Structures are given as structure tokens and as C-alpha cells.
Image: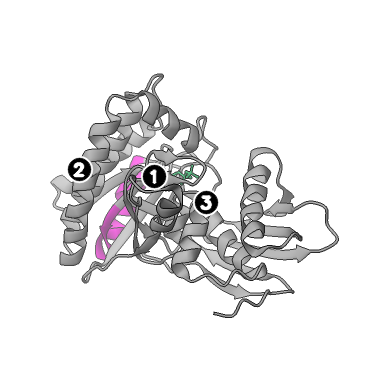
Amino acid sequence: RPRERCDGGATAVAHPNIALIKYWGKRDERLFLPWTDSLSMTLDIFPTTTRVRLDAAAGQDTVTLDGVPAYGQTLRRVTAFLGLVRERAGLRQRAVVQSRNTVPTGAGLASSAGGFAALAVAAAAAYGLGLDARGLSRLARRGSGSASRSVFGGFALWHAGDAAGTDAEADLASYAEPVPTAGLDAALVVAVLDAGPKEVSSRAAMRRTVATSPLYRPWARSSGEDLAEMRAALLRGDLPAVGEIAERNALGMHATMLAARPAVRYLSPATLTVLDSVLQLRREGVAAYATMDAGPNVKVLCARADAQRVAGVVRAAAPGRAVHIAGPGPGARLTGG
Ligand code: 2P0
């Protein structure tokens, strides 16, 4: 691969992903190594577009999100990530980063997944890292764990990597890759119940869960079994099985948080109302299954042919809230200079 730097800068687009088998808990916070494998669907809505340009004259990185200068924690995370890219490239130039995000940030709608996937692809090109897709996935992981999966379109599996190996071995072994599916015509109905930022970041919440929840280890064990069953269900194109496994895996993850000390509770009354509507859909014979992340929002997995009906029922259960229909989307890609 050419290691040319894109002197004029590089622009990349990436989409968020929603995990059907969740990532919850790191065994190494510096390297972003998870305790468990996870599996997701990349969406075709809420793209993030990020441009990275090197600025030889600048003394520090500048980052703007939707035209507003980033500061505090967000700026530190992006700057730390760029530092990693510079270290690998053997370059010192600072960068100008401009990002446009169409998903509410920090509300459990996976904004960091699309965000860091786009940043990884753009920064790797701008600094001339010459990475393949697996290398980009490993790099994106260092910005946000779930971003490793958004490098790929469709369904992607993020390998935890061997916990017994050295740091360097584990770092090499922890990447996402596409997983095969057979004729699965899936949609995700996304109910945005609360678009505001969450009170506890997912990073802090997973740290607390791993450290204090007596349910964490049992969930991590059962999640491995869920993953094996999920892969088989995807290969069969068995949507009801995929949905059932995803729903129980997500509820189990939330159970680990509820049992943490003190408890982390992302689910709200509005969440439970939507969950009831999903149960009602199933009673009516519609294959619809819910999953929730680090926030109250509900994503309902269903067949594409049922998506409008499911969205209608979810809208009725969540009046006044935005409800989107997503399909499987593309992986992160360069779109220009
Ligand atoms: C996931 N979540 O698998 C899980 C399920 C939320 C619930 O990945 O600390 O933003 O940056 O690695 O990836 C959200 O956590 O956390 C997440 P960091 P991230 O999608």
C-alpha cells in the first residue's frame, strides 16, 4: 500500500453501529481491550463526516464539531488519539480536525463509534499510515471501543483478543471484521426518547460495572454463548433467533449495571413503555426485538418489510419523540481531500 500522505488533508465518512451482542467492560483501559467479543450492525443513518488536515505551523491540534470548537474531555480524547497516529507515523505536525455529526452526541446513540471510525480513517490517510481495514479497525478501537466495528459495513464482530497474551499480542488480536449473514433483510427502528447527554459516561459506567457488579462475570460468560448462537442465527438468516439473542444479551448487560454499586440505570419509564409495545407486537405475530445501549433510547430489530408497522407502533408508544428507520449501512470510507 502506498504510504503517501494526503497533504491537502483527507475526509472520511462513517456511520454508527448498534451492538446485537454488547461490548461492556474493558480489561485494559489504555489499549481499549474488552473482556468480551461483540457483534453489531452498522447503520445507514446518522453519518459523521470528518476532515483532517496537517498544519505545520500550528502548536496544537484544533478540533471543531459541527462548527463549534471542541474543549475539555472531547478535545483531550481527540488530541490523545491524534498523538497515537503521530507516534505511528513518526510525524510531529499538528492537525486541524473538522467534524460534522448528524447523531445526538453522547446520548447512547453510538456517536463515538461513527465519530472515531471517521477520524481514524481520515487521520490515517492524512498522516500516511497506509493501513488496511483491519489496521484501521485496531486504530479506531483506540479512540472508542465500538468504533472498531464501524470501520466495516453490515454486520461486524469485534474480537476481544486473547486475554492471556502480552499487551502487544492482545493489541494485534483485537479488531473487528465482517460476519457472514444469509439473506437477512433486517431493519432497526431507532426511537430517540431522550437526545440529551447522559449523566454517566459509558466509559465510567463500564468501569464501575466491572469493578462492583456481582452479575458482571456471569453475563460475560453467557455473552460468549450468545455470540456463538448469534453467528449461527445470522448464517441461517433466522431473524427471530437473531432478535431473541440480541434482546436477552442487552437486557443482561443492563442487569449487570443495575447490580453495580452504586447502580447505573440508563433505562427510563419511556424505555419501558416502548419495550411493552415491542412485546405487544410479538403477541400480534410480528418479529420485533429490542436493544438498548448506554441511554434510554430503544432500537427495535425487525424485518425490513415490517419496519413501517413497527415504527408506527413505537411512535404511538413514544408520542412526540423522533423515530427513525435504519438498514445495514456501509463501512467507513475516504470521500476526498
Ligand atoms: C456497544 N456500548 O457494544 C456498547 C453497548 C454501549 C452499550 O460501546 O469507552 O463509546 O469509548 O470504548 O464504545 C459504548 O461505549 O466506549 C458502547 P469506549 P464506547 O455498542
Q: Quadrant of residue 238?
A: bottom left
Residue 28 is situated, as x and y percent measured from the top left of the image, at 45, 41
The circle on residue 4 is: none
Report crowding for label 3: few under 14, some 14 to 19, many 20 or more residues within 10 A (C-alpha): many
Q: Whereabouts is ligand 1, in terms of quadrant?
A: top left
Choose the circle earlier in sequence order: 3 or 2. Answer: 3
Relative to 259, is 283 on the left or the right? left
- Residue tagged by mark 3? 142
Magenta-colored span: 301-317
Q: Secondary structure at mark 3?
A: loop
Is the CB of the residue bearing disc 1 within 8 angstroms of ligand 1?
A: yes
Marks 1 & 3, CB-CB < 8 Å contact: no
Residue 3 is situated, as x and y percent measured from the top left of the image, at 62, 76
- Residue tagged by mark 1? 34
Choose the circle earlier in sequence order: 1 or 3. Answer: 1
Q: Is residue 183 above or below residue 257?
A: below
Query: In the rendered structure, which amino acid carries the disc numbered 3?
Result: Arg
Residue 183 is situated, as x and y percent measured from the top left of the image, at 22, 71
Report crowding for label 1: few under 14, some 14 to 19, many 20 or more residues within 10 A (C-alpha): many
Query: In the rendered structure, which amino acid carries the disc numbered 1?
Result: Pro
